[in-house]
Image (spheres, helix red, strand yellow):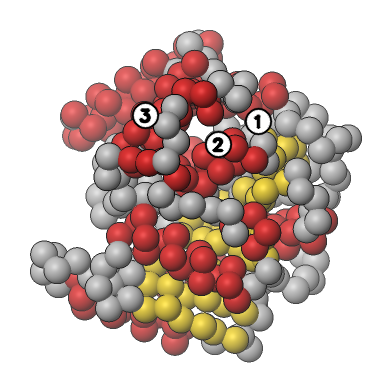
């Protein structure tokens, strides 16, 4: 797909204090040469020495955009955090564009993703059943091997695209307004682990966790939206284990796998606009499995053993894959 010429959809880049990540992100966009690019950079935290200089360096990355492009910037003078900084930047983006691609600085897109997202934005522009296009297929799962993509009930924000028609209903404070989150979870077919996971996240946000993506996932559950997911991962998360990350950082068992991407050659749609329930359930089982979560916990406790832990986990996956489903 990446060899085909295409007019890339508008792109929003979200940055903060990692100029190396932003420079690499702009380099990843260069082959697609989007004609409209939005750069949003949060401001420094008052109690972090030297962060102001890092934020300035991220802003200066705008000079690296060396192809014909309309560039708009949103540079915050003070820190708003993930909850209001990121959600406010996305609102700004969709106030200016009816549709587009959203990328945080550590979610590295392939050209295939940029082409895929652009095409899917056009295909499902007026389909009220579809809420977003996601570039991140966690475990490259899909039931129909002949199709180029499937539909999921999950909204994953590690490289995504959507429309103003969807974002207009986003409420950054929704977690505090849902009186009984368990009733909302009852609307989903998710595994018990994932229902508890979503409920715990919603409670954390209502208790002050500064994030924006949980609220977006709740919107998808409320509206029964589907997301378009490519059959292989087209966006790499290269910052998951970076100690500079806001909500992750440190060892994550799946981080090496999640930094790899594949290719979608032909855009063959699935037979129907309907959730691939089998892929969703298997993804939930793998992500909630006790063994990989245990390996992540062990690696976080013993960082010097991370290489050995990953190696042992990799061998067990090949020999006893069922252990990664329990």
Residue in view at x 13 percent, y 65 percent: 48
Visible residue check, residue 172:
yes
Q: Looking at the image, is mark 3 or mark 2 nearer the viewer?
A: 3
Does dot 2 land on a helix, a strand or a loop?
A: loop
Is 75 rendered above or below residue 131? below
Q: Earlier in the sequence, mark 3 or mark 2?
A: 2
Q: CA distance from mark 1 to mark 3?
A: 26 Å
Does dot 3 land on a helix, a strand or a loop?
A: helix
x, y percentage for residue 200? 36, 29
Q: CA distance from mark 3 to mark 2?
A: 21 Å
x, y percentage for residue 270? 84, 38
Q: Closer to the camera, 99 or 291?
A: 99
Is 317 rendered above or below residue 26? above
Residue in view at x 82 percent, y 38 percent: 273
Q: Which residue is mark 3?
A: 200
Q: Which residue is mark 2?
A: 138
In the picture, the quarter occupied by the N terminus is: bottom right
Q: Earlier in the sequence, mark 1 or mark 3?
A: 1
Left or right position of 114 against 119: left
Visible residue check, residue 232:
no
Residue in view at x 64 percent, y 73 percent: 97
x, y percentage for residue 142? 71, 31
Q: Closer to the camera, 250 or 307?
A: 250
Mark identifier at residue 141:
1
Does dot 1 land on a helix, a strand or a loop?
A: loop
| Label 3: few (<14), some (14–19) or many (≥20) C-alpha neighbours in 10 Å | few
């Amino acid at each position: 797909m990446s060899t085909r010429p295409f007019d890339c959809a508008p792109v929003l880049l979200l940055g903060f204090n990692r100029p190396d990540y932003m420079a690499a992100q702009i380099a990843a966009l260069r082959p697609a040469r989007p004609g409209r690019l939005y750069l949003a950079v949060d401001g420094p935290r008052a109690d972090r020495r030297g962060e102001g200089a890092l934020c300035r360096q991220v802003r200066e990355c705008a000079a690296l955009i060396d192809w014909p492009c309309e560039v708009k910037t949103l540079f915050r003078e003070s820190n708003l955090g993930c909850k209001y900084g990121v959600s406010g930047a996305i609102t700004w983006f969709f106030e200016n564009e009816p549709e587009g691609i959203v990328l945080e600085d550590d979610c590295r897109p392939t050209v295939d993703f940029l082409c895929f997202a652009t095409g899917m934005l056009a295909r499902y522009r007026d389909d009220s059943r579809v809420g977003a296009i996601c570039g991140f297929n966690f475990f490259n799962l899909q039931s129909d091997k002949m199709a180029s993509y499937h539909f999921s009930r999950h909204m994953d924000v590690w490289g995504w695209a959507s429309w103003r028609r969807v974002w207009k209903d986003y409420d950054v404070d929704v977690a505090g307004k849902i009186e009984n989150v368990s009733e909302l979870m009852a609307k989903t077919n998710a595994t018990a682990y994932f229902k508890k996971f979503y409920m715990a996240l919603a409670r954390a946000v209502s208790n002050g966790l500064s994030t924006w993506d949980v609220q977006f996932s709740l919107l998808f559950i409320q509206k029964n939206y589907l997301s378009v997911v490519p059959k292989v991962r087209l966006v790499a998360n290269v910052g998951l284990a970076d100690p500079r990350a806001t909500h992750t950082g440190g060892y994550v068992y799946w981080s090496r796998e999640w930094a790899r991407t594949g290719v979608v050659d032909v855009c063959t749609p699935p037979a129907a606009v309907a959730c691939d329930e089998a892929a969703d359930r298997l993804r939930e089982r793998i992500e909630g499995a006790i063994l990989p979560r245990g390996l992540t916990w062990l690696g976080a406790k013993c960082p010097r053993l991370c290489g050995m832990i990953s190696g042992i986990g990799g061998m067990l996956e090949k020999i006893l894959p069922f252990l990664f489903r329990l």
